[in-house]
Image (tube, helix red, strand yellow):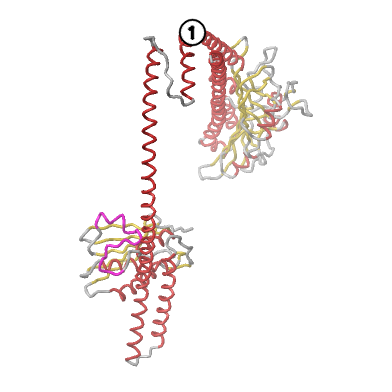
Amino acid sequence: MIASFLFVVIAGGLLSSLIGTRLVGDTIVSQARNKVKHDLNTAWLVYNHSLDRIRDVVQLTAAGRTLPQFMESKRWKNLEEFLIRRRKDFGLDILTLTDARGKVLLRTHHPFHTGDDQGSDPIVQRVLKGEPAASTVIVPREELQKEWNELAERAFTPFVPTPKAKEVPISRETSGMMLKAACPVWNGNGRLLGVLYGGVLLNHDYQIVDKVRDLLYGEGRYKGRETGTATIFQGDLRISTNVLDEKGHRAIGTRVSEEVYRAVLERGEVWLDRAFVVHDWYLTGYRPIRDLTGKIVGILYVGMLEAPYLDLRNKVVYSFFGIGVLGVVIVVLLYFFITSRITRPLREMAAATAKIAEGDLSVEVAGKSEDEIGRLAKSFNYMLVRLKQARKELEDYGRVLEEKVEERTRELTKMQNHLIQSEKMASMGQLSASIAHEVNNPLSGVLIYNQLIAKKITRGDFDREAILDYLSKMQHELSRSTKLIRSLLDFSVQSEPKIKEVNVNEVLNRALELGIHAGSKENTRVEKDLHPLPTFMVDPDQLEQVFVNLIMNALQAMPAGGTLILRTYMENREVKIAVQDTGCGISPENMNKIFTPFFSTKKEVKGVGLGLSVVYGIIQGLKGRIEVESKVGEGTTFTVCLPITQE
């Protein structure tokens, strides 16, 4: 036992130390990677801010009065001086003006090449359509030479052999990567005079990367190396960086590792992981740079030297592990000191308790001392006495309990059979009554039309069209009765309606006509306020059933007469149909029960309360809802709300 406990203590302590050191180490590295992610986002903001600045300079220059005036008056010398001054003031490498077809009118660098067509340039193309544009672009060497020979020389970069880089068949880069923006130049009458574009060549330009480094990492160094760096890649080639090579020079011409190349340049992913940068491991972030068409043309990189974080992690891990080992040693020493005083009497008690565990309650534990072990022995002996008494009581109680359980089981079985039979009889009665009540509405309409036909025949009025119309309505109501029975029986599982295009107001008028014939009263007045509504794709029979039920309920709520108000209108992209009465109203305690099957407040009316539950089921099937407002003694308003767009 002692050996086992000792093993658990030592193993637990060592395991805790290992887990703790691992968690601490992972936390340090995780925080460093989170910082890299944040730094990459910041660098991206700086990069885009540089592009936005170029766009603002070009846009403000093109939007001013000076440029259009010089162009229209053909004051080319003044225009040249103006654009050269703007280019220098704002630190642009190029600032070029074309005509309305993209032909170059003026450049701001010697030898001031003109006449070439820039209309095929994607940025200029977009501006010729009247839209400003700004993006990162790759500029071929011949185009750089047209702008300024020095730009072509800056862009020329031999490849420097780089460990872990992807093998490529070329050994140098002649094109350049530029932040470029263009804007249209309009005259006072809104006529396009030309396009002004400007840009900054990123090759061997260190403003952005140094600004990112100073902003994020300052001048910090670790063991003679920069703690944080930033780079702009053209493809996989470093063209602007503050990463230093072995000689302390900027590592222009070195290339990204093949692993990063495939992830960022080929798959377009953001890379956040450790990577080998020139000659050191860094915690890095790489983000693809895209041109105006979305094509990946380069990479923006930030990285922190991994060594400081690894050294910090190792220092914390070693300290944590040392504290853990020291704690285990102290615990083991305390364990031996304490257990040596209590294990001997406990072994004596163990022999006695073994017999008790086998069921021998006659044994007694010897305990003559007055210390904790002695008091434990006395308590143990008292527990044995109580166990003997409890065993006897349990045996007696078990016999009585078995007899009571058998008796209660017989009673519950008899009661359950009685309840099942009663529930069956109640359900059969409710279902029969509900069918009779709900079919009564359409059959009342059939009876009315039958009486009208009988009156016409009795008077000798053989109006063929009227009689055929009555017969058609009778056939319609009988068909609806059949569908009503099926709907009532299937209320718990609503079937999909047979939809077609219908006019809601027409269906409401038809339902009103049936309701008035079937349940009208001399003192009842009908008011209609029907607004034009869009047609609906619904089952007209089900919709008519809803309106008839609501109208009949309204009429039955006004036994002494009153006003029946029908309104249709649109609100919040819903069609709303309101049926209002001035009857007795619904009490607050019944408001939450009115849509419950078999609930009814009309004791004098034959029915079992399925009308509103059927209405509720139909409206739910139409993806709508029904609202109720009622005041006792003033009346009730049922509002059917149907969405204009129905799926």
- Magenta-span inclusion, residue 599: yes
Q: Is residue 477 magenta?
A: no
Which residue appears farthest toward the bottom when viewing the image? 460
Q: Decide if residue 219 is in sight here.
A: no
Q: Nearer the viewer, residue 408 or 118?
A: 408
Seen from this angle, which residue lies furthest front? 362
Quick check: can you spot residue 593? yes
Residue 149 drawn at (x, y percent)? 70, 26
Residue at 67%, 41% in the rendered image: 120
Picture coordinates of residue 322, whole percent (x, y)? 55, 9
For residue 209, which quarter of the picture? top right
What amino acid is found at the position of numbered circle 1 in the picture? Ser
Region in magenta: 587-606
Closest to the observer, 547 or 549 = 549
In the rendered structure, the answer to whether residue 140 lies left or right of residue 200 reads right
Left or right: 537 in relation to 196: left
Where's residue 428, x and y in %?
38, 66
Q: Quick one: SS at disc 1?
A: helix
Residue 590 locus on image (x, y percent): 27, 56
**175 lies left or right of 622:** right
Rendered residue at 35%/81% (across/down): 449
Q: Which residue is mark 1?
A: 340
Residue 617 occupies quadrant: bottom left
